[in-house]
Amino acid sequence: MSTRRIRGAAVTAALAAAVTACSAPGDGGPGDGTSAGSVVIGVASEPDTLSPLLGYGKDGNSKIFDGLLARDADLKLRPALAAALPEVTDGGRTYTYTLRDGVEFSDGEPLTAADVVYTYRTVLDAKTNNTFKSELDAVEEVRAEGDDQVVFTLKYPYAPFAARTVLPIVPEHLAGRQNPNTGSFNTKPVGTGPYVLSKWSKGEKLTFKANPRYWGGAPKVRSFTMAIVADDNVRATRLRSGDLDGAVLPPNLAATFKNDDGKRTYQARSYDFRAVTLPTAHKVTGDRAIRRALDAAVDREAMVDRILDGAGRPAYGPLPVDDPAFSKSVERAHDLGRARKILDEAGWKPGEGGIRAKDGRRASFTLLYPSGDKVRQDHALAYASDAKKAGIDVRVESATWEVIEPRMKDTAVLAGFGSTGDPDFGLYTLLHSSLAGDGFNNMARYDNPAVDRALDNGRRSQDPDERRSAYDKVQRALVQDPGYTFLTHIDHLYVLADHWDGLGTQLEPHEHGFASGPWWNIEDWQPKK
């Protein structure tokens, strides 16, 4: 899960949004046509904030902002606001960046090193309400040397630190005058990126127009709109009618456009996994035998085939099977017999209706999933079906995130996570006990000292072999002491009208829609000739 949350909506509300999101010419609607350089994309959710200080765009690809560095199509780091990759000295404890000449914010004010320092110091300030401070734990100090140089001093050598500097930079002259948690900058941002926000109709759409001051040159797509359509079926209907130029869709709906010559489907591999959180505070999900039995009972291959139509892979842990740090030894088959044996040995005996019980307590718990998310609903129902065969009663319920969040402490949730770039980026926030209950970090409140030590070693070591060993220990420990039931890694599917050249996908994180997707480089698209 993340701070950018998918909010459930009734079909009627989504249909109402379909009417209001149809834009008049000049407002970034599909009626403008590609000749006018406009694109309308249908996505399932909108950000809670557009401020990087609170987490927006922290992993790169924000269209409003730039980081010191950015990633290319292959996720290799490249200079953005920095003129070059950083100079690394002092055994990996000092990173020095020199800023690109002539960069301006969209309001005309020049970018300086002071803006970079302000951004990082504010993010790290305990008073700033974000949940990603731990990602910059290595930073001891950030300072400016003149107007064009920024120096980071680290507490310890942190091998993937450069990748953390894709964090977008905000203007101190505006954001610095406001409370970062409540100021107007959260909804009226100013950045250095290729686009500026021209309008945000909450729950309906966000419209962006090309930034005439963009240091990278004028984009050919002069405006684009992200239409917020929570319901998958409504997004598909609007795309089919021509009301949308593109949309993110689940596999079953993306497949309906297979023979549409005017549309093209893009399939992106991802680190995005679906998992069931198993809170330790709950009397049933907190029992290790229950967690181990569920891990053995779940049929991951069937989920990939039947729910994802093959557009994904089984998830044996938080890292996908093709990640270089994935431990092949943790691959395991669906084994209902093993699940039953684990429960028998732990004293969970079959009772009424085949549901097990121990010391008078039934093996039963509630599993929540966000309303309107068909893929999560299908995962939840399949999980409950598999669990019942082992004698565990899982009661599936849908709810909005406003309802789910207060219950996450002691109620299981069908959640989504996954970060690209380095094993530390996804595993630390998912599993480290110091982050238990910190927003969507460590939702299961997992607490395993051996895992904590391995995560700390992986974060602090610069030796590749030591780091691989640390993450191997983490993955092995999760098999013996699972805090989550990992289900599938899903591919992301997008269908777009075939009007532009230059589209492609990156290897994507859990977060997709606004940044990830074929529009990750929309500023580089060219009209088809």
Image: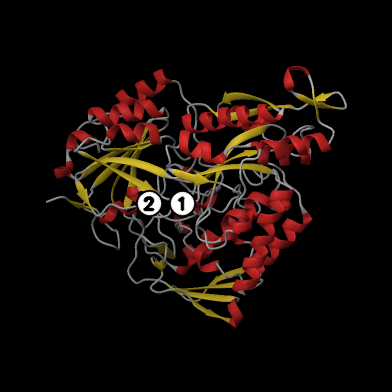
Residue type at mark 2: give it.
Ile
Identify residue for label 2.
64
- Report helix, strand or loop for mark 1: loop
Name of the residue lying farthest toward the right: 359
- Report helix, strand or loop for mark 2: loop
Residue type at mark 1: give it.
Gly
Question: Residue 289: x percent and y percent?
Answer: 77, 39
Instruction: Give 226 or 474, whichever is nearer the viewer.
Output: 474
Badge 2: how crowded within 10 Å, few (<14), some, or many (20+)?
Answer: many
Which mark is drawn over residue 8?
Answer: none
Is residue 399 in sight in this rendering? Answer: yes
Which one is earlier in the sequence, the residue at label 1 or at label 2?
A: 1
Q: Is residue 278 above or below residue 20?
A: below
Is residue 2 in sight in this rendering? Answer: no
Identify residue for label 1.
57
Question: Residue 104: x percent and y percent?
Answer: 34, 62
Name the residue: 76% across, 39% down. Answer: 280
Nearest-to-viewer mark from 1 and 2: 1
Name the residue: 58% across, 37% down. Answer: 299
- Tag 1 near tag 2, CB within 8 Å: yes
